[in-house]
Image: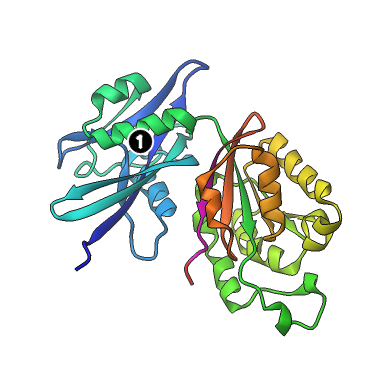
Amino acid sequence: MQTPVIQAAGAVLWRRLSDELVQVALIHRPRYDDWSFPKGKVEAGESEISCAFREVLEETGYESIFGPELCKINYLVGETTKTVRYWSAQALGEAKGVMDPAEVDQLIWVTIADAYDKLSREGDKEVLVNFEKFGIDTTPLVLLRHGKAIAREEWEGDDGDRPLAQLGQIQSMRMLARYLPFGITEIHTSDAVRCYETVAPMARSLSLDMIYWSELSEYAYEKDKRAAINVVNDIIESEAHAIVCGHNPVIPGIVAKFIGKKSFKQLDHGLMPGEAFILHHRDGEVIAIDWMPAPDA
């Protein structure tokens, strides 16, 4: 008999007070009389990152922008395994929400050094170690493969005009919840129909104009790889929180160019339709890479 697993997610919420001073938020839960990071159970139909984003707001009152995924912690609750995935999350301004005092009765901002002393669980201290390694001052770049398209053999027109299949259309409608935590400010796309159809619903929801690039198409990439790399390099240098929707042959080549000789285990996933690599960069250097699964149908 398989042991039941509780899926949960949370984040290390942080703010910068000066070049030298970074603080993290700790919450006190009266039910357990402990100090921890905001987290909670994943609800039905909810992705883990959407859960973490929601829990940060509910348990701290702060809106936030997410950075890299930090780690996954497993521990036992009775005879049940609980798995918690954590992200880095930068607080925006002052708290706007109201905490439920039955769930969280105190929130304090402390230095990282003080957080090690205050945290109740050893597992949370492991999360903090990873936060110190790569969780601060990064900018996200989402490299998204288009959603499931009509098969090439079933399409008689130009390949650039090949649209999304029904599954791809469903995926496109469910993209927003996965990428809302990253504070997206720009949406770039290959000029292939299947690419801009993938991000069009998200662009409408965020009131953003899509930026089209013929250089990111499969056809153009085969002829001039440097042009596509230059497009992405300009986006990275702008430090925009951006999504780039493209193709499977193009995205891995771009990733390889920007990581150089670095190795990231998340790249082992490859990219199926609707999946993405998220490059977290700082000063032009890729610090961490996350893999994002496609939305459930």
Quarter of the picture containing the N terminus is bottom left
Q: Which residue lies furthest to the right in this view?
A: 223
Residue found at x 58% / y 51%: 277
The image's colour scheme reads rainbow
x%, y% of residue 207? 64, 54
**Does 287 sit above or below residue 2?**
above
Q: Is residue 13 left or right of residue 171?
A: left
x%, y% of residue 88? 44, 38
**Does 294 sit above or below residue 102?**
below
Between 287 and 96, the one lying in front of the other is: 287
**Does 265 sit above or below residue 296?**
above
Q: What residue type is labelled 1?
A: Val
**How many marks are shown on the rendered structure?**
1
Reply yes or no: does residue 43 show up in magenta.
no
Between 32 and 122, the one lying in front of the other is: 122
Q: Which residue position is annotated with label 1?
A: 127
Q: Quadrant of residue 145?
A: bottom right
Q: In this view, does 80 lie to the left or right of 168?
A: left
What span is in magenta?
288-295
Q: Is residue 111 visible?
A: no
x%, y% of residue 50? 43, 53
Kindly state the secondary structure of the residue where label 1 is placed. Answer: helix
Q: Is residue 169 visible?
A: yes
Q: In this view, does 102 lie to the left or right of 150?
A: left
Residue found at x 43% / y 27%: 132
Q: Dot 1, crowdedness within 10 Å: few (<14), some or many (≥20)? A: many
Q: In this view, does 162 lie to the left or right of 295?
A: right
Residue found at x 24% / y 25%: 118
Between 179 and 104, the one lying in front of the other is: 179
x%, y% of residue 86? 38, 43
Q: Residue furthest top?
A: 20
Main secondary structure along the magenta-highlighted residues:
strand
